[in-house]
Amino acid sequence: MSARQKVATFNSPLEAGLRALSVLVPAFPATMDLQRLVAFDYLVVHTADAGGPESLHAELPLRPAELLVRRQLVERGLMLMMSRTLVERIAADDGISYRAGEMAETFLVSLTSPYLIELRACGEWVVDAFNPLSADALRDQMDRIFGRWIEEFQAVQRSLAADA
């Protein structure tokens, strides 16, 4: 298989769509806008950054930069899940939001790999911890998480500069 033919599963639309389902299903019948889904997409795999259970993905030094590329990826994941009627797009006066489709929970619980079982648990934790927050309060929480990370990153930079 050539490099061009290899299928990317990490951060593919399929994985982003599954992450979206992992938060939309436990939040049902509530809806979420794209901004919240992008934040939750980060939080669901980096739960330890927010004081939650062990993170699903490694604590790479530049992980908060992931937010810069997540929006388009989350959109593509939502489109894939909508094409399978697992996610519904809701248009309202206050904008577009998304919610789990009728078969989303059945589909999600039918996936039984250890990673996906943990993803569902992390999704439930994120919904319980962050979905009750207003958009402003969620933004404040994300700023706090990334502010702490920036301080840690700057300390590493200073340390590396001192060694040079």
Image (cartoon, grey):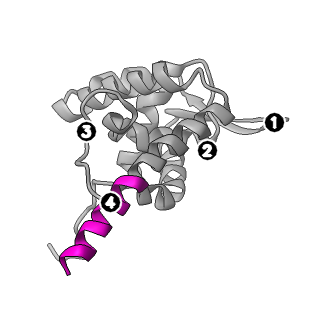
| Looking at the image, residue 74 lies above or below residue 69 | above
Residue at x 67% of width, y 34% of height:
135
Front-most of 143 and 17?
143
Gap between marks 3 and 1, in whole Å? 33 Å
Which amino acid lies under the numbered mark 3 shown in the image of this protein?
Leu
The circle drawn on residue 56 is 3
- Is residue 89 visible in the rendered image? The answer is no
Q: Which residues are magenta?
A: 150-164
Q: Secondary structure at mark 1?
A: loop
What residue is shown with label 4? 155
Please provide percent x and percent y for residue 91.
76, 37
Front-most of 75 and 164?
164
Q: Is residue 87 left or right of residue 117?
A: right
What residue is shown with label 2? 35
Please provide percent x and percent y for residue 58.
22, 48
Gap between marks 3 and 4, in whole Å? 25 Å
Gap between marks 1 and 2, in whole Å? 13 Å
Please provide percent x and percent y for residue 34.
61, 44
Which amino acid lies under the numbered mark 4 shown in the image of this protein?
Ala
The image quadrant where one finds the C terminus is bottom left
